[in-house]
Image (spheres, grey):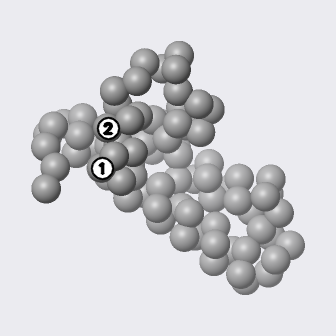
Amino acid sequence: MILEVEKISSLPLSELSIGDKIRKQIIFAPFIIFIYCLTIKGGIFDGWRGIYYAFQRMFAEILLSLRLIEYRYFKEFD
């Protein structure tokens, strides 16, 4: 996550991919990824496995968002 945060934070917005631009939106990114996994990727049709995967991806995005907050406001990592 630390490497991902450094990559997202160091590049200008014009050089980021769409996924990274979404990840920069700290509050909305986990929810967008959850909906993306269920609808666009078709996870809803996989039953509980698809929902479980969507929650895992959402959790990973929450962790990334927390690291982005730490980076923006504290500029330090462990």
Residue placed at 16% from the left, 49% from the top?
77
Query: Do the CB atoms of the residues marked 2 and 1 lie less than 8 Å apart?
Result: yes
Residue 20 numbered mark, or none: none
Query: Residue 57 is drawn in which quadrant?
Result: bottom right
Which residue position is annotated with label 2?
6
- Would you call the spot at circle 2 few (<14 residues within 10 Å), some (14-19), or many (20 or more)? few
Q: Is residue 51 left or right of residue 45?
A: left
Where residue 4 sits in the image (x, y, percent)? 39, 45
Q: Is residue 35 above or below residue 20?
A: below
Which residue position is annotated with label 1?
2
Callout 1, which amino acid? Ile
Residue placed at 28% from the left, 43% from the top?
69
Callout 2, which amino acid? Glu
Q: Secondary structure at mark 2?
A: helix
Q: CA distance from mark 2 to mark 1?
A: 6 Å
Q: Secondary structure at mark 1?
A: helix
Q: Is residue 15 above or below residue 44?
A: above
Where residue 62 sits in the image (x, y, percent)? 42, 57
Number of numbered tags placed on the structure image: 2
Indicate the quadrant containing the C terminus: top left, top right, bottom left or bottom right: bottom left
Camera-nearest residue between 71 and 44: 71
Q: Is residue 18 left or right of residue 46?
A: left
Query: Residue 71 is drawn in which quadrant?
Result: top left
Q: Is residue 71 left or right of residue 27?
A: left
Q: Is residue 5 left or right of residue 14?
A: left
- Would you call the spot at circle 1 few (<14 residues within 10 Å), some (14-19), or many (20 or more)? few
Where residue 44 sits in the image (x, y, percent)? 80, 70
Where residue 10 sits in the image (x, y, percent)? 34, 27
Q: Residue furthest bottom?
A: 48
